[in-house]
Amino acid sequence: MITLVLGGRRSGKSDIAQEVIGSGPVTYLATAVVDTPVMEARVTRHRSVRPASWQVIEEPFDITSVLRKTEGKVLVDDLTGWVSNDVEGADFESLAFALGSRTGDTVLISEDVSAVRGRLPAAEERYYDRLGELNQIVSRIAQRLLYVVAARAFEVPRWHPEGSGIVPLDARPGYGMPTS
């Protein structure tokens, strides 16, 4: 099963992804390049809450090779870093193929770009365009999409042209407006 965990910056995506991947043998694929004190603090926090038994592979560029070679469960943290490390060189087609050919569960984390507003410098605009494109590709092949807001995850259903994949909130048990 492929699960994409998507959300805004500091929304709790990594904690949710760790819950989703579960226990047992897990390979944690870290894409971060630690080049600032802020990034060092984030990596230190992630290390402190990650099970010590997990195998950690730090690979900021060639995650597709790691995915092809790795058996069992893999948690990719995160696609945002992978794209920012090489905006033009990140090979989305190879990643999609590697994901589609895996037999173990794969959980991927990525930042949602829909909250980015206003005009951006050209380099940032290109980065967000590429990340948004990648999120769409992974979402299409993932069996599950979880959207995280303030440490709460919502499962996003697949959309179908007939509309059967969209469920109105008031039609779901517990989501209706009170009737009094």
Image (cartoon, rainbow, N blue to C red):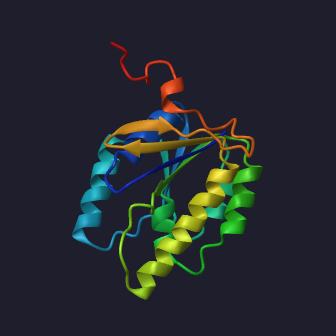
Q: Is residue 162 above or below residue 63?
A: above
Question: What residue is drawn where x is 67% and y is 62%?
Answer: 95
Question: What residue is drawn where x is 52% and y is 78%?
Answer: 86
Left or right: 36 in relation to 72:
left
111 and 31: which is toward the camera: 111
35 and 164: which is toward the camera: 164
Which quadrant holds the N terminus? top right
Q: Is residue 123 above or below residue 134?
A: below
Q: Position of residue 53 (x, y in %)?
A: 45, 38
Q: Where is residue 160 in the image (x, y as percent from the top left)?
A: 71, 43
Q: In this view, does 67 lie above or below 80?
A: above
Left or right: 73 in relation to 58:
right
Which quadrant holds the C terminus? top left
Q: Where is residue 68 in the image (x, y as percent from the top left)?
A: 71, 56
> Is residue 21 visible from the viewing direction of this image?
yes
Left or right: 172 in relation to 70:
left
Q: Quadrant of residue 159?
A: top right
Q: Is residue 40 above or below residue 1?
A: below
Q: How many marks?
A: 0
Q: Position of residue 23 (x, y in %)?
A: 50, 30
Question: What residue is drawn where x is 74% and y is 51%?
Answer: 100
Farthest residue in the front direction?
Answer: 180
Farthest residue in the top direction?
Answer: 180
101 and 125: which is toward the camera: 125
46 and 51: which is toward the camera: 46
> Is residue 22 visible from the viewing direction of this image?
no
